[in-house]
């Protein structure tokens, strides 16, 4: 995923503060190209910068257009976001499905545009006709309308996460330990418990089974396993030191 080829397009947004919050959402996810269908003079730049925090430059560098078609003419994909389904709206992708599609396109150095409609009306059927596919963000049947900046955040986040998959070691969580590695931690724990006289040898097997059951369900990381081992080793060392001083 080449995030520099992602374009966020806001179609006639009503509220200046929503534009600022959308800029902040974009910056959170390393997306910087903003295009707005509308007139710059209609917006309060001070309000935009207040909500954008340190992402005001995204608005300062934004380009303005008269239509979605004009704003996306250099893009290979123009995806309109909508929460409403209908015969005229075709098949709508989920955000993660769209991110997978955008991945290969942006890597080919083509631009991908994500279009967001006006806060009150969303994208009309006519505006969606200017897009070549649709994306929907699932939300509550009881209260389905998302704030503009929230919708931008969700879509940007899915694209950002897709990009992270290609970056080794960044935000990738951890790989749970194998059972063999868990057994090594269990042995360290029980060895040190035995050193301090916590149980007699016949009781060791039950204690090992207890720790193996707990730790295998805990999905430990390597760092957590090492921390446990160091803790029990230090406990045994301190116990031995205190015993020698008596």
Image (cartoon, grey):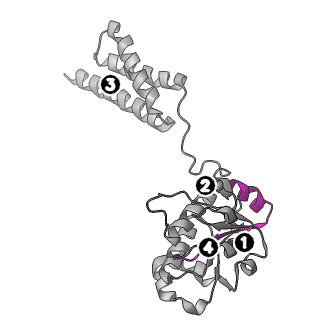
Instruction: Say if residue 53 shows up in the picture.
Output: no
**67 or 143: nearer the viewer:** 143
Label 2 crowding class (10 Å Cα cut-off): few <14, some 14-19, many 20+?
A: some
Check disc 2 and report the residue beneath it. 161
Q: Earlier in the sequence, mark 4 or mark 1?
A: 4
For residue 82, side relative to residue 67 (left or right): left
- The percent coordinates of residue 193 (x first, y second) are 33, 20
Q: CA distance from mark 1 to mark 2?
A: 28 Å
**143 or 207: nearer the viewer:** 143
Q: Earlier in the sequence, mark 1 or mark 2?
A: 1
Above or below, 154 relative to 75: above
Q: Nearer the viewer, mark 3 or mark 4?
A: 4
What range of the chain is rendered magenta?
A: 99-119
Q: Mark number for residue 236?
A: 3
Above or below, 197 relative to 219: above
- The percent coordinates of residue 165 (x first, y second) are 65, 50
Q: Earlier in the sequence, mark 3 or mark 2?
A: 2
Q: Earlier in the sequence, mark 1 or mark 3?
A: 1
Q: Secondary structure at mark 4?
A: loop
Check disc 1 and report the residue beneath it. 129
Tell whether position 114 is magenta: yes
Check disc 4 and report the residue beneath it. 123
Quarter occupied by residue 89: bottom right
Q: Secondary structure at mark 1?
A: helix
Q: Nearer the viewer, mark 3 or mark 2?
A: 2
Marks 3 and 2 in Cβ contact (< 8 Å) = no
- The percent coordinates of residue 16 (x first, y second) are 50, 83
Instruction: Say if residue 126 shows up in the picture.
Output: yes
Q: CA distance from mark 3 to mark 2?
A: 44 Å
Q: CA distance from mark 1 to mark 3?
A: 71 Å
Q: Secondary structure at mark 3?
A: helix
């Amino acid at each position: 995923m080449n995030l520099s080829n992602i374009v966020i397009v806001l179609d006639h947004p009503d509220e200046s503060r929503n534009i600022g919050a959308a800029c902040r959402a974009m910056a959170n996810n390393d997306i910087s190209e903003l295009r707005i269908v509308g007139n710059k003079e209609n917006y309060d730049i001070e309000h935009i910068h207040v909500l954008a925090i340190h992402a005001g430059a995204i608005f300062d560098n934004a380009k303005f257009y008269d239509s979605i078609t004009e704003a996306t003419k250099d893009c290979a994909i123009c995806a309109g976001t909508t929460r409403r389904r209908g015969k005229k709206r075709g098949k709508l992708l989920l955000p993660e499905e769209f991110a997978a599609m955008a991945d290969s396109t942006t890597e080919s150095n083509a631009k991908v545009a994500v279009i967001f409609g006006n806060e009150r009306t969303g994208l009309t059927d006519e505006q969606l006709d200017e897009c070549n596919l649709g994306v929907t963000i699932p939300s509550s049947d009881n209260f389905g309308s998302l704030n503009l900046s929230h919708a931008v955040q969700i879509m940007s986040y899915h694209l950002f996460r897709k990009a992270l998959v290609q970056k080794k070691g960044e935000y990738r969580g951890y790989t749970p330990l194998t059972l063999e590695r868990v057994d090594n931690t269990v042995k360290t724990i029980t060895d040190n418990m035995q050193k301090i006289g916590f149980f007699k040898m016949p009781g060791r097997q039950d204690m090992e089974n207890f720790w193996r059951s707990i730790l295998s369900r805990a999905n430990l990381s390597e760092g957590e396993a090492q921390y446990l081992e160091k803790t029990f080793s230090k406990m045994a060392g301190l116990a031995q030191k205190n015993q020698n001083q008596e």
